[in-house]
Image (cartoon, rainbow, N blue to C red):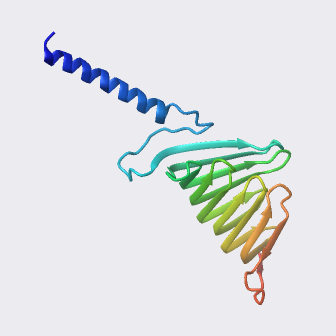
């Protein structure tokens, strides 16, 4: 064999070894219900972008939390954090109604399932609708706090407030203003 052929064979072997190492390090991990359909390498190389994610989790009580996003960015400093765009989430409560949440953006922690929804947040459940600009949701604590321009529509009433706190499991809700001198505005829908 001449030197040129040996160099070509060595180069091919080197490419195969490097490709294998990259595959096993970055692409062959168990992603626990995370479906990665496409990685966009044209964006910032210091983070990982994925499209069309669907992540599902269950708690010990049998409640299910499903979150979908058209695009996500995984935080390079904390692999458990994803920054989401065009978010839809469902909370399937055992022996109760389903809660649907949508927003333009979100921050999701895949370790404890806490999610912050932001911009154009809409929460819908059994004849009730809550809108706001920010929702801090804890799946483990069953608590959701909606704030900034909160509008609650339900039971033939419309309420305007600064903050709404809801226990997702019991549906117990507190609606209030940040300034105690101001009052929640209530209108009838009839």
Q: Is residue 189 in view from this perspective?
A: no
In terms of image quadrants, where is residue 103?
bottom right
- Compared to 35, does 80 lie above or below? below
Residue sitting at 77 percent across and 90 percent down?
Answer: 181
Front residue of 52 and 138: 138
Q: Is residue 119 in view from this perspective?
A: yes
- Compared to 23, does 166 lie above or below? below
Residue 150, horizontal then vertical, whole percent: 69, 73
Residue sitting at 73 percent across and 70 percent down?
Answer: 152
Residue 76, horizontal then vertical, whole percent: 49, 51
Residue 70 horizontal side relative to residue 43, left or right? right
Residue 44 horizontal side relative to residue 171, left or right? left
Residue sitting at 68 percent across and 50 percent down?
Answer: 113
**Could you tell me which quadrant the C terminus lies in?**
bottom right
Front residue of 15 and 59: 15
- Compared to 173, does 160 lie above or below? below
Residue 138, horizontal then vertical, whole percent: 73, 57
Residue 102 horizontal side relative to residue 1, left or right? right
Residue 77, horizontal then vertical, whole percent: 52, 53
Front residue of 127 and 185: 185
- Total marks drawn? 0
Residue sitting at 45 percent across and 51 percent down?
Answer: 47
Farthest-out residue, front: 3
Front residue of 187 and 105: 105
In terms of image quadrants, where is residue 141?
bottom right
Farthest-out residue, bottom: 181
**Could you tell me which quadrant the N terminus lies in?**
top left
């Amino acid at each position: 064999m001449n030197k040129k052929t040996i160099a070509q064979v060595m180069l091919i072997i080197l490419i195969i070894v490097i490709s294998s190492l990259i595959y096993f390090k970055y692409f062959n991990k168990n992603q626990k219900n995370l479906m990665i359909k496409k990685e966009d390498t044209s964006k910032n190389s210091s983070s990982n972008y994925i499209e069309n994610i669907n992540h599902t989790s269950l708690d010990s009580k049998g409640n299910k939390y499903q979150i979908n996003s058209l695009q996500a960015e995984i935080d390079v400093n904390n692999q458990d954090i994803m920054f989401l765009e065009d978010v839809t989430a469902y909370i399937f409560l055992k022996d109760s109604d389903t809660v649907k949440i949508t927003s333009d953006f979100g921050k999701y922690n895949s370790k404890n399932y806490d999610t912050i929804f932001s911009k154009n947040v809409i929460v819908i459940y059994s004849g009730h609708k809550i809108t706001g600009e920010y929702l801090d949701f804890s799946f483990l604590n069953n608590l959701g706090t909606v704030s900034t321009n909160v509008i609650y529509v339900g039971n033939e009433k419309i309420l305007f407030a600064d903050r709404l706190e809801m226990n997702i499991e019991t549906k117990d809700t507190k609606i209030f203003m940040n300034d105690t001198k101001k009052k929640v505005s209530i209108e009838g829908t009839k």
